[in-house]
Structures are given as structure tokens and as C-alpha cells.
Amino acid sequence: MRLILLAIFAFLFCTTLLAQAQPHPALIGYWHNWNDAAAPYLPLDQIDPRYNVIEVSFAEPVVGSSHDIVFTPSGNTIAEFTTQVAQLRAAGKVVSISIGGANAPVHLDSDQERDQFVASMVNIINAYGFDGMDIDLEGSSISTTGGTITAPVDATIIRLIDAIRGIMAGYRSANGSKLFLTMAPETAYVQGGQSAFGGLWGAYLPVIDALRDSVDILQVQLYNSGSMYGLDGVIYEQGTADFIVSQTEAVIQGFSTSGGVFEGMRADQIAVALPACVSAAGGGYADTATVFDAVRYLLGAGTQPGAYALQHSGGYPDLRGLMTWSINWDAAPACNGSYSFAENYERIFADFSTEVQENAGMAIAVFPNPASDLVRIELPPEITGQVKVLITNAVGQHVLEDYLSANSTITLATEQLEAGLYTIQLQDTSGLKGFAKVFIAH
């Protein structure tokens, strides 16, 4: 890697890298679009800033339909809500629209229904300025009658895969960037494939496998679950450290089913998904100490907290982060104290963080982004005197540190950097002055 410092004039280019955010470690929270006495409606601009992926819940089929999807905010005007989405994105957050939920089955029973599904989702994404989409189909939405993980035969599953690809292709064509894609299946649809492959058991696996190169985060719901097999052949119960560790490693390492082998996902595509408190789910809550011990062990930074031993002894330091249902519940004082889940995330990833607060400092211009060979960094004129340039990778390791005078442009050759997310910080004697994130994709 080489760093070339070119002394040229600087100009103000305070820009927000919309649709390019790649939070890592990620704190993902569902935000529910209704008022609950115990977990009230929460305007988007009041969300704790530690949440860097916000999943708006839910876009649902219109009454009488299984494929024509609509969304309207319930506690704000459309104009207010759209402005708040833009503000969150300007602060470096991903704001996704989540499809489905437990009470809204989605079925694509014909090619016409598939096309209407795509058109309605594109309209929602464009209307509100979302830069992500979450697939949270539950109940009867996904079911398999045969085939294999790599060769599904159910037309509804094939149409769903095609529809997601169509929505993402349309977004890239319109915006010049990738739509952030997450999925939040229940355990039976994923790890349940170890027990059986049919009906709901393992039914999400063909969807995940077909879209594995597009999935940014897979966050299997480790709650409201029955007991599940670990890779060691032992059955584990929800709400325990063993369940968290065993089920997380299963989706990273992969496993065998009667429908073929699920090859597993990269650790940086996997988030641990848990309820914010007991009241937030029907089962599966684990207290903050249990979650801390389990996730630190998964990261390779803690001791084994239970009976299940990781097959990969070094752990998974690239683990993407945590997800919770929901931000509204986490914000409620009666839910284990306000933002206890966010605080625990901060403790867990303290030494894995990029050490940059998303809302701190001044955004600096970095282009192109994503980048393959060269990245150019423009310094705003507000920065005077000598400045330190610090570049860290996704797990907080420093990969470059240098000093230069203000009124300069940095050109960074990236051929020796691994593909992934990097954070660029500018610091002077008073502290952090600017930051940006860049994704290297060779």
C-alpha cells in the first residue's frame, strides 16, 4: 500500500455518503410503526444514536392482497417521516423498510403478483428515501414442498428470489449503489433444516443461498423459538448462552440437511438477534450478562460461557453485530431500563469498534465509494494546521497513520487492502475533526 500526498487547494465538500453506509459493528434495531402502551411510538429523530441500522416495521400487503405492499407512518405525517429518514441517512445510518412480520403473510402466486410486489416495493423505497430492505417473512409466507437448497422447486420461493433481485436491480439502476439487504427468519426456517427439510423447516435456506452474495446481514431471530440442534448434535434451549453461540456458529459454518448442504455465510454477514427485554418477545430473552458472555466468546474475546464449544477455536472477530426487537422496547424505561440493549452492545464491541461516533465530526469527501484501486480524500478548509490521518479496518485495527498539512488531498492506493469497510479519521490537537467510511471492493 502506498500513500501519495498531493498538495493542492482544498474545497468544502461536506457530503453525506447516502446509500453507501456499511455499519460494522452494526447495532440493528427494528422500529415499530404503532403505539404500544409499554413501548410507545418513537419518532425516528428520537432514536438512540448508537443504532446504525434502523429497520422500519412493517410494509404489509393491502387488505385482501398477499402481494400489493403498502406503508404509511402512523405517528408522523409523511413529510415529517421522510425528512427524519433523510436525517438518519445523513448521519451515516442505514434506514431499511421491513416487509412482512408475524401478522402479514406475503405470497407471490403468479408472475403478475410478483411484478406487482416489485412495483409496490420500489414505490415505497423511492417515496420515503429508504436505502435498505429487510425480509421478515413469517408464518405461511415461505414453505417448501421439495427440491433442494440450491435448486428449489416451489414457484412461490423462486418468484420471491426473482422479486428481491428485481427490486435490488431497480435500486442500483436508479441510485448507482447497492440496496442494503437484511433478512430476519425464525430459527425453524434456517437452523431447523438440520431436523427436517420441508414445510417451514429450512424453507428460508434456498432464499438465503440464492441471494448470499447480496445479503448484507442475516439476523436469525434467536427468540420465540423451540429448541434447536447445534453443530455438535446436542439440542439447546433459547434464552441461554449455548443457544446464542451454537445457533450463530451454525449459520457461519453451515450444516447438512436432507435438502443438501447449507454452505454457511461469512461472519461479517451475521448478526445476533435477540429481544430487548422479556416483554418484547414470547420467549428467548437473555439477560445482558448472558448476552455479553456469549457474544464475546463468539468474537474470540471471551471464555466459553456454557457447554457448547466453538468449532472454530479462534472465534469470529468479524461478526457483524447485534439486532434487537425492538428500538421502541429498548427505549422504554420498563424494558430492563432505557437502552440497556444498546449499552450492552457498546460494552461488547468496545475494543472492536472503529472508535468513531457516527454523529461526531465533519463528513469529509471520499470518492469513488465503493472503490477498487484508488481513493481520493478531500479535506475541508475548516481544518487548519497539521492533521493526522488514521485509517482503521472493520474491527478497529489501524492499517495506516500519517500526518499532513491542511489544504491537501490524499490519494490512497488500495491494492494491498483486503476488501471490506474502512473508516478514515482526521484528527488535530483538539480531537476528531472529520470522518468518512469507504468500502473497498476489488
Image: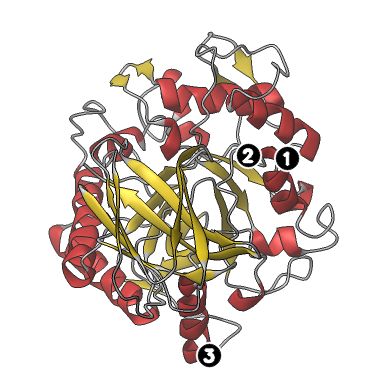
**Which is nearer the eye, 136 or 336?**
336
Earlier residue among tags 3 and 2: 3
Secondary element at tag 1: loop
**Residue located at (60% from left, 59% from top):** 357
Residue type beneath disc 1 = Tyr
Q: Residue at x 43, y 58 (%)?
A: 404
Q: Residues within 10 Å of mark 3 (few under 14, many from 20)?
A: few
Q: Residues within 10 Å of mark 1 (few under 14, many from 20)?
A: many
Relative vertical location of residue 352 with respect to residue 384 in this rendering, above or below? above
Q: Quadrant of the C terminus?
A: top left
Q: Is residue 155 left or right of residue 332?
A: left
Which residue is at the front of the view, 159 or 107?
159
Which residue type does callout 3 highlight?
Thr
Q: Marks 3 and 1: in contact by CB < 8 Å? A: no
Task: Write down the quadrant of residue 134 in the picture.
Answer: bottom left
Nearest to N terminus: mark 1 or mark 2 = 2
Q: Quadrant of the N terminus?
A: top left
In the rendered image, residue 371, in percent from the top left (x then y), is placed at: 25, 52
Inspect the image, locate mark 2, and give the three-letter code of the amino acid beneath it: Tyr
Q: Position of residue 133 (x, y in %)?
A: 38, 60
Q: CA distance from mark 1 to mark 3?
A: 34 Å
Q: Is residue 43 visible?
A: no
Residue 173, located in which quarter of the rendered image?
bottom left
Q: Dot 3 corresponds to which residue?
A: 77
Q: Is residue 342 above or below residue 361?
A: above
37 and 296: which one is in front?
296
Residue to which mark 1 is pinned: 285
The residue carrying mark 2 is 223
Q: Secondary structure at mark 2?
A: loop
x then y, percent, for residue 26: 53, 49
